[in-house]
Every structure is written in C-alpha cells, then in structure tokens.
C-alpha cells in the first residue's frame, strides 16, 4: 500500500492529489491514507499537505542535495570532496565568501532554500525550498585576475553539457544565463576576491529552477523551470553532472590555458549566435546582430551601421 501511495503521488508529479481521490483509488479510508503519509514523512519523504488541495510530493529522500547523495561514486579530483549542505541559509554565495579563504578549493555550499538569494546587478534570486539547485563552488585558480571572467563561460558550458546529457535541450545566452524554450532556467553569479596580481578565491554561484511551478509577476514572462517545461530530472543527477563536466573543463583551462572545448560548447549551444539581440547599457538599448564568440570568449556583434564590435561583458536581451 505504501508503494501504491508513493506511485500515485509520483504520477501526479508536482500536482496535488486529494485525500479523497487517494482513498477512492486505493480502496482505503482517508484516515489510513493519512497514516501512510505520516509514516512516509518519517522516512524522509517531503510531502506537502494543503487544505482543500490534498497532498503533493516535494522531495524523495534520495533527492536531497546532501554529500551522501551527490558524492557517491562521483569520480572528481577536487570538486565536491567537501559538500556543506543546509536546509536553509541566506545566500550560499555569501556563506562561501565568508569561508572562502580558509576552505580548500572545490568545496561546494548547497542549500535547499535561500532566504536572501542574490542575482546579478543587485537583483533578488527566488530560491524556494526544494524547488531548485542553489549552490556555490569555491575555486582557487593560480591565474591572473583578468583571466577569471572566462570561468563564468566554463560554468555555462558545463551546465549546458550536464543538462543535455540528461535529455534537456538547454542553450546559453552569453555570458551568464541558461535558457530553455526561450526562458531562463539558470543564472550564474561569479564573485572574485583578488589582489592586483593574484586571486584569493572565486565563488561560483549557480541557481537552477528545477521544480518551481509559479513565478512572481515581475519574472513570469522570462523565467521558467525544468518541471514547468516538462523535464522531470533529479536534482542530484544535475549537480553530479555539473561537477563532473565543470571540473574537466576548468582543469584544462587552469593547467593548459585551453579554451577550445568551452568555446565549442558555447557556440554549438548558443541561444543568440546568428540572431538579432539587444545590447543593454544602463537605459540604452541597441538592436544588433550577434555574429560569434571569439577566442577570448567575448561576443562579436554587428551594428546597424555595419561596424563590427567586440563586447567583453554586459547585459543582452533576446
Ligand atoms: C543571475 O542573476 O542570473 C545570477 C543568479 C545566481 C543565483 C545563485 S543561487 C546560488 C548562489 N547564491 C546566491 O545568492 N546567488 C547564487
């Protein structure tokens, strides 16, 4: 009976199923349904119950983003050897910045919820419980600081590769966003602590909307989640794949200054190359054609007057 209940709730994915419907389908009383739900919760199933709506499975016990679930049989050399897992925290980037100097390279800070998740340009990043992947990776590359921005591209490339290997046809909107069906599912916030000639540490923050079904009015036209686009993928599998992909591309860059694979992925999975886009600087918006990403990882665009320009950083919109 326990298995049947789990199956029913799982079949409903992230939708609610009422106690009455469950009791009819399974031929047991509503009290019996409730008792089974209670014991499932004790086993670690996170089942939400809402008055007049019913029950909804938020998390299976094996999908929590803990060290045990993520690091099991993961063959990385440095990434994820230490995973600091929180049920809730203000921001994983803020925490990583605090411990960045003492902690060793590759440590991952991950939380089921963030109460003050931060996006780029001082924006908020909505990070509800169990709905996504909110994580920060501490990096200590022995490179000069001006080479650090490329690490954002490495992150984008590894996220897209990781998702593609799980059957999700995600694309990169240079330099920081991952897009699915024209809407944003993931953002990257790279923060640097450095002196003029050397890096103390980098905090690579990654936020992926996995199960979020409702977005606030201000972002609902531009944001989406994997579940909303009908991709039911395990958060643990996504994190494991990202750590694997990222480590290999990162070490090639740090040790051999090799950018080729990253550039190839960014070009092949670009959401903007060959398209008209807007470049945004403050209040100014300019319609341009996106031509390519060059060997440095910068964007090459063609303006309306025919001139070609290289963009090093900044915001663009599709
Ligand atoms: C963006 O604006 O697109 C970047 C969003 C980055 C969000 C992630 S979630 C984990 C980490 N902690 C934060 O506070 N922000 C980043």
Image (cartoon, rainbow, N blue to C red):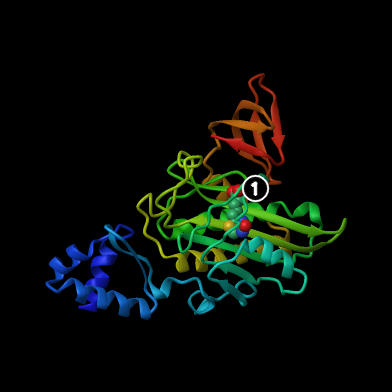
Location of residue 137 by image quarter = bottom right
> Residue 68 at x, y = what percent?
50, 80
* Position of 229 relative to 137 (above/below): above
Label 1: how many Cα within 10 Å (few below 14, some 14–19, many 20+) = some
Q: Is residue 122 left or right of residue 63?
A: right
Q: Nearer the viewer, residue 100 or 305?
A: 100
| Residue at the (51%, 56%) spot, across then down | 208
Viewer-closest of 29 and 211:
29
User: Callout 1: helix, strand or loop?
Assistant: helix
Residue positioned 55% across, 67% down in the render: 88
Relative placement, left or right, of 263 versus 46 is right
Asked if residue 25 lies left or right of residue 278, the reply is left
* Residue 290 rendering spot, x and y as whole percentages: 59, 33
Residue 155 shows in the view? no
Q: Is residue 194 above or below residue 66?
A: above
Q: Is mark 1 within 8 Å of ligand 1?
A: yes
Q: Residue at x 71, y 35 (%)?
A: 310
Question: Going by the picture, which residue comes out furthest to the front?
Answer: 51
Instruction: Please tell me in which quadrant of the rendered image residue 312 appears.
Output: top right
> As drawn, which residue projects farthest toward the top?
305
Q: Position of residue 55 (x, y in %)?
A: 29, 64
On screen, residue 89 versus residue 103, left or right, reads left
Query: For the N terminus, which image quadrant?
Result: bottom left
Quarter, ligand 1 = bottom right
Relative to 4, does residue 302 appear above or below in the rendering? above
- Along the line of sight, the residue nearer the viewer: 244 or 70: 70
Q: Residue 307: tell me if it is visible.
A: yes
Residue 23 location (% of width, % of height): 16, 69
Which residue appears farthest toward the right when viewing the image? Answer: 196
Q: How many marks?
A: 1
To which residue does mark 1 refer? 120
Query: In the displayed structure, would residue 75 be above or below residue 167?
Result: below
């Amino acid at each position: 009976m326990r298995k049947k209940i789990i199956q029913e709730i799982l079949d409903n994915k992230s939708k609610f199923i009422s106690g009455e419907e469950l009791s009819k389908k399974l031929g047991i009383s509503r009290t019996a349904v409730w008792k089974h739900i209670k014991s499932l919760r004790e086993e670690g199933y996170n089942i939400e119950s809402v008055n007049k709506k019913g029950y909804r499975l938020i998390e299976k016990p094996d999908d929590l983003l803990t060290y045990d679930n993520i690091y099991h049989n993961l063959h990385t050399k440095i990434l994820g050897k230490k995973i600091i897992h929180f049920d809730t925290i203000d921001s994983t980037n803020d925490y990583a910045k605090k411990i960045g100097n003492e902690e060793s390279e590759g440590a991952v800070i991950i939380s089921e919820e963030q109460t003050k998740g931060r996006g780029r340009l001082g924006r908020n990043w909505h990070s509800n419980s169990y709905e996504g992947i909110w994580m920060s990776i501490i990096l200590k590359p022995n490179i000069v600081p001006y080479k650090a921005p490329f690490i954002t591209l490495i992150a984008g490339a590894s996220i897209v590769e990781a998702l593609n290997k799980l059957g999700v046809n995600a694309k990169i909107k240079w330099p920081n966003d991952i897009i699915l069906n024209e809407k944003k599912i993931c953002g990257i916030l790279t923060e640097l602590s450095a002196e003029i000639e050397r890096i103390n540490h980098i905090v690579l923050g990654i936020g992926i909307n996995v199960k979020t079904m409702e977005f606030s009015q201000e972002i609902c036209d531009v944001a989406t989640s994997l579940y909303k686009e009908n991709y039911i993928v395990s958060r643990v599998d996504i994190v494991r794949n990202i750590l694997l992909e990222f480590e290999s591309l990162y070490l090639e860059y740090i040790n051999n200054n090799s950018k080729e694979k990253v550039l190839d992925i960014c070009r092949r999975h670009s959401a903007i190359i060959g398209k008209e886009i807007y470049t945004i600087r403050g209040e100014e918006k300019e319609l341009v054609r996106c031509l390519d990403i060059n060997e440095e990882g910068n964007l090459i665009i063609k303006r309306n007057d025919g001139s070609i320009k290289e963009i090093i950083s900044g915001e663009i919109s599709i």
